[in-house]
Each structure stands twice: as C-alpha cells, then as structure tokens.
C-alpha cells in the first residue's frame, strides 16, 4: 500500500489543473520513496528566499518555479553556487528578469531555494510508459552520453537487484563509473539503491507517465538527485 502522502501530492497537482509536478513536488514524491534528493524549500518573496537560504546554509541554488517553464536553465531560471544573502537578492531578481525575457507570459509561482550539491559524476535515471508493456526505467551517464550517444540501458519495472546491477554495467561508458584517469570510482551501490527505489515508485504510482531525474550526481560515497521532473 502506498503512503497517503503520495496520493495527496497527485491530488494537489490535479486540483491545480496541471499534468506535471514542479521540481519541489517531484522531489517530495521521490523523498517519500527514500530517494536522496537535495533539501529544498519554495519561497515567495526575495526576503523569504534569503531567510530560507540562511536557514539551509550557503552555498545554495536558486531555481524558478513556473508552470510555463519546464526546462528551467533554458529560460535562465537556474543559478548555482550562491554564497551569501546579497547573492540571493540579486540572483532572485536576475532569474525573474531572465524568465520574463525568455517566456514573456510566464507566471512565477515561486522561487526554489535548495542545497548546493558538490560536483560529482552526472548520471540520469528516467522513465517513459510503453502503451503495451507499461513503465520502463532508463539509466545512463549525463550530458553528451545520453543526448548525443544515446548510451542508455532500459528495463520494464519492477526490476530486481540483479537487473539494476546489469543496467549500470551494460552502458558503454561504464568504465567512467569505475574511475578513470585518477578519478575515484562512483558509488555503484548508491546507484543500485536509486534504481530499485525508483522502480518501486513507478510500480506504486501509475499516474507517472514520464520521469526524468537529470542530473543525479554520484560520489565516491553516495549520490544526490539535483533535478527531478514528473509528467502525469
Ligand atoms: P533544468 O530544468 O534546466 O534541467 P536543473 O535543475 O537540472 O534545470 O539545473 C541545471 C543545472 O544546474 C544542473 O544540470 C546541474 O548541473 C546544476 N544544478 C541544479 N541544481 C543543483 C544543485 N542543487 N546542486 C548543484 N548543482 C545543481
Ligand atoms: Mg535538469
């Protein structure tokens, strides 16, 4: 049985007339399945954002929350590594200006303040729904590996631990995860855990037609989901 809080997220989104989750809602959902998401809070005004950032601790990341802006950085809606309160104030203004110039009719729902995750190896975990076979789960390395080389692995959900381990090993760029040129190896156990928990979430949430966790940053120990998008 899935948690009542999961149903409440979907109900709130549908009640709002949307067919997609804002990043904060998607991360809240992922968090309910034990997935390692960044700490986040959605704020209305510049001063609210400053208070939230001070409470969270610097550096922080600011991101636009708008129903018209699904690809946030394309609209200048993401600023990373903000180091102090003045940075939050100027960053807030800059993001609002950027978004207004890229998407003139964008409604601004709020500003997402989140913990800045340290740099790591970028991977992607995603899902689409096949009309015949149901939800798939996808794994790949971030950036050019997915976009240009289409170096990804797929399974239908639910997956087993062995499936998850194989998904990671069968991408062509697997060597990068093992550590190359003095770079430490990535925590594959953390990735297996993310794949298994994502599979459970997809099985329990037939509402999800598309999922995109891009990027997930993987470290020598642990991993962090820094962006998540869910389409219903
Ligand atoms: P988009 O909607 O454009 O995909 P993202 O949320 O993925 O926006 O942010 C764009 C980029 O900013 C990410 O690919 C990542 O490199 C960086 N980023 C976003 N959030 C964080 C974070 N919390 N910590 C560190 N880097 C981040
Ligand atoms: Mg992204």
Image (cartoon, rainbow, N blue to C red):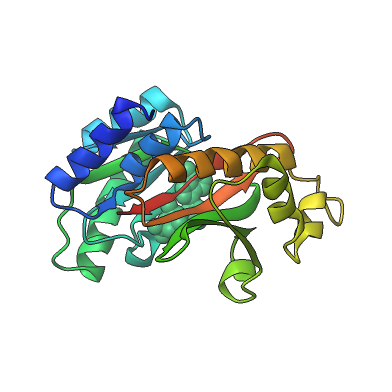
The relative height of residue 176 versus residue 105 in the rendered view (above or below) is: above
Pinpoint residue 146: horizontal percent, then vertical percent: 59, 68
Count the marks: how many? 0
Q: Is residue 41 in view from this perspective?
A: yes
Quarter containing the C terminus: bottom left
Q: Is residue 101 left or right of residue 177?
A: left
Pinpoint residue 98: horizontal percent, then vertical percent: 28, 62
- Residue 167, picture quadrant: bottom right
Residue at x-position 68% and y-position 40%? 161
Pinpoint residue 65: horizontal percent, then vertical percent: 26, 49
Looking at the image, the residue that sits furthest to the front is 132
Q: Nearer the viewer, residue 119 or 66?
A: 66
Q: Is residue 189 left or right of residue 117?
A: right
Q: Is residue 187 in view from this perspective?
A: no
The relative height of residue 13 versus residue 150 in the rendered view (above or below) is: above
- Residue 9, picture quadrant: top left
Q: Nearer the viewer, residue 111 or 156?
A: 156
Quarter containing the N terminus: top left
Residue at x-position 65% and y-position 43%? 160
Looking at the image, the residue that sits furthest to the top is 55
Pinpoint residue 197: horizontal percent, then vertical percent: 54, 38
The relative height of residue 69 versus residue 9 in the rendered view (above or below) is: below
Residue at x-position 82% and y-position 58%? 175
- Residue 73, picture quadrant: bottom left
Q: Nearer the viewer, residue 205 or 91?
A: 205
């Amino acid at each position: 049985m899935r948690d009542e809080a999961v149903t409440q997220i979907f109900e709130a989104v549908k009640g709002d007339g949307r067919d997609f989750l804002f990043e904060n809602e998607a991360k809240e959902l992922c968090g309910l399945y034990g997935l390692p998401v960044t700490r986040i809070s959605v704020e209305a005004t510049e001063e609210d954002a400053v208070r939230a950032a001070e409470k969270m601790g610097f550096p922080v990341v600011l991101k636009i929350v708008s129903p018209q802006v699904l690809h946030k950085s394309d609209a200048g809606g993401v600023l990373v590594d903000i180091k102090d309160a003045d940075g939050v104030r100027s960053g807030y203004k800059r993001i609002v200006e950027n978004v207004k110039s890229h998407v003139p009719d964008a409604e601004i729902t709020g500003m997402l303040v989140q913990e800045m995750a340290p740099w790591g190896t970028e991977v992607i975990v995603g899902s689409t729904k096949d009309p015949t076979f149901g939800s798939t789960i996808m794994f790949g390395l971030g950036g050019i590996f997915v976009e240009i080389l289409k170096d990804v692995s797929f399974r239908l959900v639910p997956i087993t631990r062995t499936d998850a381990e194989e998904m990671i090993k069968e991408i062509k760029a697997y060597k990068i995860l093992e550590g190359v040129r003095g770079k430490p190896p990535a925590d594959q156990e953390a990735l297996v855990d993310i794949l298994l928990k994502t599979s459970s979430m997809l099985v329990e949430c037939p509402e999800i037609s598309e999922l995109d966790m891009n990027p997930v940053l993987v470290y020598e120990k642990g991993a962090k989901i820094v962006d998540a998008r869910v389409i219903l």
